[in-house]
Amino acid sequence: MIRRTSLTALMSAVALVAGLGASATAYAQQTTLRVFSGGANQRPDLMRKLFDQYQAKNPNVKVEIETGGATSELQRQYLSTVLNAKDSAIDIYLIDIVNPAQYYGAGWLEPLDAYLGKPADVMKPYLPVYASSNVVDGKIAAMPAFADAMFMYYRKDLLDKHGVKEPKTWDELSVAAAKIQKAEGNPNLQGLSIQGAPIEGAVCTFLLPYWGQGKDFNDAAGKMTLDKDAATKGLGTWLSMVDAGVIKKNVAEVKTPDTVNEFKAGQVVFAINWGFAWDRFKDDKDSTVQGKVGVMPLPAMAGGKSATCVGGWQWAVSAFSKNKAAAAGLVKHLSSAESSKFLAVEGSLLPVYQSVYIDADVNKTAPWFKDAANVVIAGKSRPMSKDYGQVSDVIRTTTSAVLARTKTPAEGVTEIESRLARVMR
Amino acid sequence: MAGPTTWDRVRDPSEKTLGFMLLAPAFLLLALIVVYPIGKLIWNSFYDLRLSGGGGIKFVGIENYVLVFKDPDFWNAAKNTVLITLITVPGALVIGLGLAMLANLPFKRKWPVRLALLLPWALPLAFAGLIFAWFFHTEYGVVNDVVRRVAAPPEPAMWLLRPNWAFAAICLTIIWKTSSFMALILLAGLQMIPKSLYEAAEVDGASKWQQFWQITIPMLTPSIIVALIFRTITALQTFDIPYTMTKGGPGNSTETLAMLIHKTTIDYLDVGYGSTLAVCMFVLSMFVTAFYLKRIGRNA
């Protein structure tokens, strides 16, 4: 009796496997691509629409979407696990601009030269910072999806009211902000809001006044080229603004949303934040600054040049994908000028093509992109390293400690140098 | 006649074989979820295993352990962990004992008191950390609001941005969070003490204070030791509350061992060195547990 039951079970299992095999043959023409599209800030809803467009044109390709991880760090942790296991489940993934070097170094992504062409030709139409960040060791590591950058937002109404022009240097900004604060007489009004909490934004807080002196943190090969005096001076600039009352004293507690909320509440004259903040100032119901906000290039240090911190997202094909050619085809569509325009019009995501910034349709929905283009073009990428997780942690933790005044700028810079000397060589 | 085959032995096992067979599933399960991970951890600690490099695995012997001993971050984290343990365990014991004695008073309705005791314990650690981070926030925090109304200092205190104050804030939070657990265990102990002892002491003319030291504390010692063991082991593993309150900051002045291990493996993707740190923490926990067990042996 028992024997017969197990025989029946075995036979039905064989039949099931055979059936599956038959249906697999029937769908042999159909390629399914699975795409990791980041978290809510990367607008998977819009990405899904881009996939649908591609599916309509290529009926033999089916695109599945996977999302997860609210922040760049969480997404990196997840993808590291998947890719270390050499998992072929995900064909394409959306990665932060700080990641192509790391992923390429780890052998996790498929160079796209063979599918798309020579790097010099393929990358030509893109903004320079994206063209360079996505080429590693002379190979196309990933293709730009959309841009982001740290912008200097300011209260147009207050600057006009007090006859202050857009400051060109940090010193000018400090003076201008102090003048407005004094004239307004509001003790809660901050001159400048920056992010000092140990979050990713603090990496940019460290780099902005350093880059503003025309210095680089690393060379093309990723080796650290830290100018300690310039870095010390950069951190000192923030502290002197704290002393002048332009930046608030507990700046080491300030995170990205704090800057957004306080600016929205009308308590900030100048604020540094990512591109998404613009829509929050403009569209949020609780924003008291609608129509009063301007965007300008970041100030430079006296005698230096303006530079901002660039973010943004790229499409990469997994080295473990079983459908690399099909995946490269989809990436080509996703990184096209049409897709960039679609994301700009539908979601105010910053274009990676210079041409899209001056597109008439784009300028109708997002007039500020005209100004934004110059800011993004002047942007620099954060240090490229296969150990970016560690580089970021060291810089943001130390910067926050200096802004909390538990370390002097000189001590902080020495610590950054000694901790990263091993990692960035 | 041939002897019994293996199949026969399985079908009709001797007492001893049956014992092994019955134990096997539990043993296998334990091996899978306890022995294997710990073994793998110790194994990894002898390798250069960095996931970020893609360079593969390299045997490095005891190099990771040498690095740990030279690593100022390790010693800083170890110091913070031990300090948190030394401050919060006795702190929670004292507060917990007070709460337990309070709850042991003959209230008409017992459930509101019990509920009040249970609530902090039922709250997830990370939530407690996030809530207290708001309490101690320089501008929006309730702590500074109260201070401002009472003392009106010229400048609000930046609790979480000063190393010692941040440390104190974290310890306060941990004591608040964990003393209710202490109180629950001690309350059970208190209710085991026979009332007749107190009545006899009353007749003999002992004061309340004498009753406390001569009856309550000695009778409660077994419960106190159990509570201390649990609390000390979890204190050595402190992670959630400092992670959510300060992320180890400012700098790494409030970073604990568990946080350093998390950072090394999850953020830096350095699994080899992270495993070495974890082995060191494991050894530390073993020492403390062994110390307690020895003390219990002496008391029993």
Image (spheres, coloured by chain):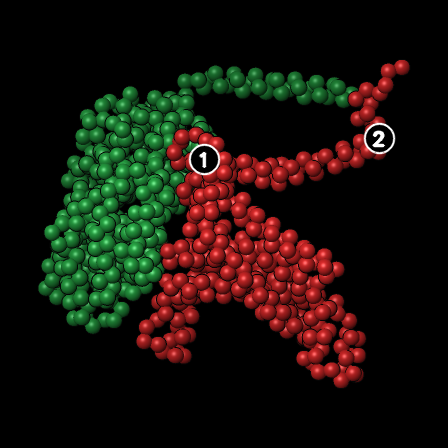
Q: Quadrant of residue A285?
A: bottom left
Looking at the image, residue B190 lies above or below residue A237: below
Q: Position of residue A29 (x, y in %)?
A: 41, 18
> Which chain's residue wears label 2?
B
Question: Would you say residue B117 is visible in this rendering?
Answer: no
Number of residues whose C-alpha sits closer than 10 Å to that of mark 2, classed few (under 14), some (14–19) or many (20 or more) = few
Residue at 65% of width from left, 72% of height from top? B101
Q: For mark 1, give the secondary structure.
A: strand
Residue at 67% of width from left, 35% of height from top? B28
Q: Position of residue B74 (x, y in %)?
A: 45, 50
Q: Please identify the quadrant where the C terminus of chain A is shown.
A: top left
Q: Pick whichever, A55 or B170, lies toward us.
A: B170
Q: CA distance from mark 2 to mark 1?
A: 49 Å
| Left or right relative to A419: residue A350 | left
Q: Position of residue A199 (x, y in %)?
A: 35, 51
Q: Which mark is residue A419?
A: none
Q: Which residue is mark 2?
A: B14
Residue at 67% of width from left, 21% of height from top? A9
| Left or right relative to B103: residue A237 | left
Nearer to us of marks 2 and 1 is 1
Looking at the image, residue B218 lies above or below residue A82: below
Name which residue type carries label 2.
Ser
Q: Position of residue A14 (x, y in %)?
A: 61, 17
Rendering colour (chain B): red
> Which chain's residue wears label 1?
B
Tell me which chain appears green: A
Q: Which residue is mark 1?
A: B48
| Left or right relative to A405: residue A34 | right
Number of residues whose C-alpha sits closer than 10 Å to that of mark 1, classed few (under 14), some (14–19) or many (20 or more) = many
- Sooner in the amino-acid sequence: mark 2 or mark 1: 2
Residue at 25% of width from left, 27% of height from top? A138
